[in-house]
C-alpha cells in the first residue's frame, strides 16, 4: 500500500501547475546550510518564492527520476553530491546549460565540458578517530590499512546506497584496491550504514571508534568535542563534488539562472565555506580549521574523465557488489 501512495505522490507532484516565480531547489546540503542561504536569497530576490526539498543524494535522484516519469519534476535547481548522476542527466539532455563569466574561473575538472553542471562546493572525505581510546601513534594513517585485522570491529562508514559522498569514496577505493579490500572490511565487522552524521555518532559512542567521514562534519565539532581527531589519509583524501545544475523545462530558466549565479558569487561561496566546505574558486578562503585547498588537492585521489566515465557505466554494478559483500 505504501508503495502505491508514494507513486501517487510523485504523480500529483509532477502534475501541479507551476508558479512562474517559484524556485524549487532539491539539495543534499545540510539543513544549517539551507538556513544560512535561504534568507539571503529571499533578500536578494524578493520577487521570488523559494522552496527546498532536502534529502540525501540518492533520495533526490530517485525523486527526480520518479517525477520525470510521471510528467515532469518540480525541481528548478539541483544541488547534490552524486556527480555521476548528473552525467547521466546530461547524456539524456535533461539539464540547462550555464555559461556566465564567473564559471570560466572554475577548473575544468570540476565542471561539465558543455556547462551542464558545475561544482558548487567541495566536501572532502577524510578519516577520524576517538582520541579517548586511540592515541595519535595508534591512529590509522591510510584507508588501505583499515583492512588489517587490528581494526576488527573498529571501523564505521556511511552507505553508498544512501550517501553520494560515500558512493564516490567506494568508487575510488574499489578502483584502486579492488573488491578484496571490501571483503576484508566486511570480515573485520565494519558497519556501513546511514550517512556521515551516523558515522560521527558511532565514533563518539565508541561503537566504532574509527571512521571515514566528511571533513565538514568534523569541523562542526571544533571547540565542542575534543575527542574527535582528524586524519588526512596518506593514500589520498577523496575530494567530492557538490554539483549544481538547472533542470531543462519549457518555462523560462531566467530565475533559476539568476539564483545559480548568486550561489557561485562571492556571497554564495562564502556561505558554502561557512558550512565547512571548500570553494572551487581560488579567491575564496578555506573553511575555518581546514588546511589550504592546495594541500588537499595534492593529497587527493585524482579525478579524470576516464574515471567519471568508468563510474557512470558501472554505478549499479558498484552498488550491487558493495551490497553483496558488506551486507552479506
Image (cartoon, rainbow, N blue to C red):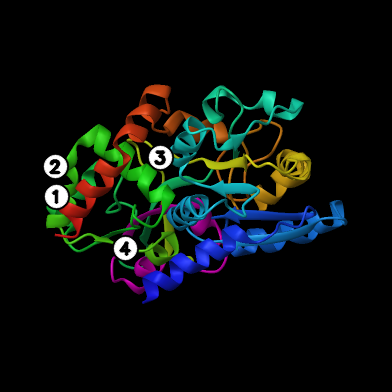
In the rendered view, tell whether residue 296 sits above or below residue 106.
Answer: below
Camera-side mark, 3 or 4: 4
Q: CA distance from mark 3 to mark 1?
A: 20 Å
Image-quadrant location for residue 246: top right
* Residue 184 counted in the magenta span: no
268 left or right, relative to 221: right
Magenta stretch, residue numbers: 201-225
Secondary structure under badge 3?
A: loop
Residue occupying the point 70% across, 43% down: 269
Image-quadrant location for residue 197: bottom left
Q: Earlier in the sequence, mark 4 or mark 1?
A: 1
Q: Are marks 3 and 1 in contact (CB under 8 Å)?
A: no
Secondary structure under badge 4?
A: loop
The circle on residue 237 is 3
Residue highlighted by disc 1:
184
Q: Nearer the viewer, residue 257 or 124?
A: 257
Q: In this view of the protein, can residue 221 be seen by the observer?
A: no
Q: Are marks 2 and 1 in contact (CB under 8 Å)?
A: yes
Q: CA distance from mark 3 to mark 4?
A: 20 Å
Q: Where, quadrant-wise, is the N terminus in this rendering?
A: bottom left
Label 1 packing within 10 angstroms: few (<14), some (14-19), many (20+): some
Q: CA distance from mark 2 to mark 4?
A: 20 Å
Camera-side mark, 4 or 1: 4
Residue occupying the point 22% across, 54% down: 323
Residue 16 picture location, percent across and down: 65, 61
Residue highlighted by disc 4:
193
Camera-side mark, 2 or 3: 2
Secondary structure under badge 1?
A: helix
The circle on residue 318 is none
Q: Earlier in the sequence, mark 3 or mark 1?
A: 1
Amino acid at each position: 500500500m505504501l508503495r502505491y501512495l508514494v507513486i501517487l505522490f510523485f504523480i500529483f507532484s509532477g502534475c501541479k501547475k507551476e508558479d512562474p516565480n517559484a524556485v524549487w531547489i532539491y539539495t543534499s546540503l545540510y539543513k544549517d546550510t539551507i538556513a544560512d542561504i535561504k534568507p539571503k536569497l529571499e533578500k536578494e530576490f524578493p520577487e521570488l518564492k523559494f522552496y527546498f526539498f532536502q534529502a540525501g543524494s540518492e533520495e533526490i535522484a530517485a525523486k527526480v527520476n520518479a517525477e520525470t516519469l510521471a510528467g515532469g519534476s518540480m525541481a528548478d535547481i539541483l544541488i547534490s553530491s552524486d556527480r555521476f548522476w548528473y552525467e547521466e542527466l546530461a547524456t539524456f539532455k535533461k539539464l540547462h546549460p550555464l555559461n556566465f563569466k564567473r564559471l570560466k574561473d572554475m577548473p575544468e575538472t570540476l565542471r561539465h565540458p558543455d556547462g551542464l553542471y558545475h561544482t558548487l562546493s567541495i566536501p572532502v572525505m577524510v578519516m577520524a578517530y576517538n582520541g579517548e581510546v586511540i592515541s595519535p601513534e595508534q591512529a590509522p594513517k591510510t584507508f588501505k590499512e583499515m583492512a588489517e585485522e587490528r581494526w576488527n570491529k573498529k571501523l564505521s562508514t556511511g552507505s553508498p546506497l544512501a550517501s553520494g559522498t560515500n558512493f564516490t569514496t567506494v568508487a575510488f577505493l574499489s578502483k584502486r584496491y579492488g573488491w578484496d579490500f571490501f571483503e576484508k572490511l566486511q570480515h573485520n565487522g565494519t558497519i556501513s550504514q546511514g550517512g556521515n552524521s551516523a558515522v560521527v555518532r558511532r565514533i563518539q559512542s565508541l561503537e566504532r571508534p574509527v571512521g571515514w567521514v566528511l571533513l565538514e562534519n568534523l569541523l562542526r565539532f571544533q571547540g565542542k568535542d575534543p575527542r574527535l581527531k582528524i586524519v588526512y589519509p596518506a593514500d589520498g583524501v577523496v575530494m567530492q563534488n557538490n554539483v549544481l545544475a538547472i533542470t531543462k523545462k519549457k518555462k523560462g530558466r531566467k530565475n533559476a539562472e539568476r539564483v545559480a549565479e548568486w550561489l557561485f558569487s562571492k556571497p554564495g561561496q562564502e556561505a558554502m565555506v561557512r558550512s565547512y566546505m571548500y570553494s572551487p574558486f581560488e579567491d575564496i578562503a578555506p573553511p575555518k580549521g581546514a588546511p589550504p585547498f592546495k594541500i588537499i588537492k595534492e593529497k587527493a585521489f585524482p579525478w579524470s574523465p576516464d574515471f567519471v566515465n568508468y563510474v557512470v557505466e558501472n554505478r549499479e554494478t558498484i552498488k550491487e557488489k558493495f551490497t553483496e559483500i558488506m551486507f552479506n
